[in-house]
Image (spheres, rainbow, N blue to C red):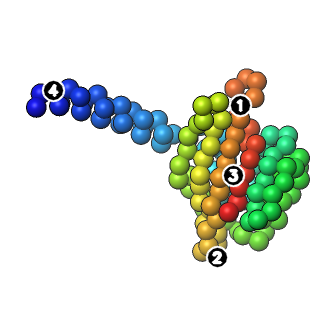
Amino acid sequence: MLKFFYVLLPVSLLLCAQQATAQTPPPVLQAFSSAFGKGDTAGLNSLLHEEVELVERGKSGTYQRQVVAGKLADFFRANPPAGFQLRHQGSSADGQLYAIGQLTTQSGSSVKVLIRARALPGNQYKIIKLDLL
């Protein structure tokens, strides 16, 4: 029984530490969550990489940042946001950040949002892919 305790305790401490870390999103994801939940396209524009892959309900393409900001403005006009919540976040082996969130619209519908960001020099992250499903 004592051996079981020595094995179980470090594992449970490790899991608690991972959960505490996972609860605090990196600054780029915090800023995205705040701006997306308000429909703030100017705030989102500052978080976007120069080129962003945008997937929007069956349509996809890689666009310049200003084009994506315009498409997001159109999206928010059609889907006025009531709030946004990050549901899951993590990072890949190559250092990219990813997150899954859910936008709730004023009409009561929801949109799943997948975000991928990459580090630039100076360890500043910019969004490189955005899926609105």
In the rendered image, residue 73, in percent from the top left (x then y), is placed at: 81, 61
Q: Earlier in the sequence, mark 1 or mark 4?
A: 4
Nearest to the eye among marks 4 and 2: give it.
Answer: 4
Q: Which residue is mark 2?
A: 107
Q: Which residue is mark 1?
A: 119
Q: Residue at x 53, y 53 (%)?
A: 87
Query: What separation in Å lies between label 4 and label 2 (alpha carbons)?
Result: 56 Å
Query: What separation in Å lies between label 1 and label 4 (alpha carbons)?
Result: 43 Å
Q: Which residue is mark 3?
A: 35
Where is the N terminus found, in terms of image quarters?
top left
Query: What separation in Å lies between label 1 and label 3 (alpha carbons)?
Result: 20 Å
The total of numbered circles placed on residues is 4
Q: Earlier in the sequence, mark 4 or mark 3?
A: 4
Q: Residue at x 81, y 57 (%)?
A: 60
Q: Earlier in the sequence, mark 1 or mark 3?
A: 3
Q: Quadrant of residue 103?
A: bottom right
